[in-house]
Image: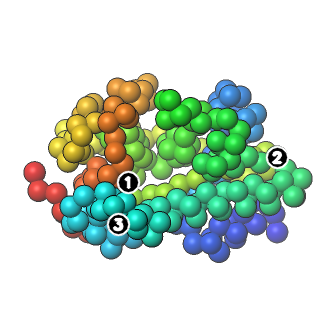
Amino acid sequence: MNIEQEIKNYLNKNGVSFIHFTDISFLSESQNNALPNAILFGIVLSPAYIQKVGTTTNYVEKMKQNDQIQNDEFHLTEIKTDRLADELADYLQAKGFSAFSQSEANIEAHSLYNKLENSTPLPHKTIARLAGLGWIGKHNLLVTPQFGSTISMCTVLTDAPVNCISALPMQSLCGSCSVCVDVCPTNAIYGNSWEAETSRDNLIDFRKCITCLECLVQCPWTQKQVGNTIYIP
């Protein structure tokens, strides 16, 4: 069994929804850690969770107030994807390959998280876009035709020999939609359409974002995945 199949078997056994092997060799060393390939994987949030968040006023704030955020599905899924990335990187290193987990803890441990700007050198969504998985929405989140924004992702950068399938990055399909702008309680989203050269700061004021998840769950592409419409303009 080759290493690519071992990676797939491990991630699939742990319930991931998708796996992409992406060429990042053309990026700067400050972004790719001098590693040519990225293993991108993610877990899709359940329709029931999206429905619950979308129909519960101030869902995230209530979870925090009731000290229940540790039981939140999105929170738990983020922890799981980070853990899988750490374990996969350790496994690849044990096999003699170079590997770097882009889990939140590992990025912070290597001083790659800019706390002031709330940024990292190579976000998961950038790799996802290079993999042809989706585009960046007006809310600065990845949007995919299949899953909307209902994804928790993580990545491992490596020199392990995997078959990176080339994909053309998708253009934004947000069009004139302004749902994410309309539902944002802090007016953090400007409503500008994303293009390849668009910076985060042209899309949102990240200092105003309270991570309420409204833009994520109410996005029409997310609702298409859930199979209904919560937001009524």
Label 1 crowd bin: few (<14), some (14–19), many (20+), radius 10 Å: many
Distance in Å between CA atoms under marks 1 and 3: 26 Å
What mark, if any, has residue 210 been given in the picture?
none
Identity, as a three-letter code, of the amino acid under mark 2: Ser
In this view, the residue in front, 125 or 102, is 102
Mark 1: secondary structure: loop
Residue 76 percent location from the top left of the image: 50, 65
Label 2 crowd bin: few (<14), some (14–19), many (20+), radius 10 Å: some
Q: Which residue is drawn at 31% across and 57% down?
A: 61
- Please give the residue where the numbered disc 3 appears in the rendered image: 66
Mark 2: secondary structure: loop
In this view, the residue in front, 17 or 212, is 212
- Please give the residue where the numbered disc 1 appears in the rendered image: 149
- Please give the residue where the numbered disc 2 appears in the rendered image: 98
On screen, residue 73 versus residue 42, left or right, reads left
Q: Residue at x 37, y 33 (%)?
A: 207
Q: Which residue is drawn at 40% across and 65% down?
A: 67
Residue furthest left in the image: 233
On screen, residue 75 versus residue 13, left or right, reads left
In this view, the residue in front, 229 or 1, is 229
Number of numbered callouts drawn: 3
On screen, residue 172 versus residue 106, left or right, reads left
Distance in Å between CA atoms under marks 1 and 2: 31 Å
Identity, as a three-letter code, of the amino acid under mark 3: Asn
Residue 174 lies in quadrant: top left
Of callouts 1 and 3, the N-terminal one:
3
Residue 34 percent location from the top left of the image: 76, 33
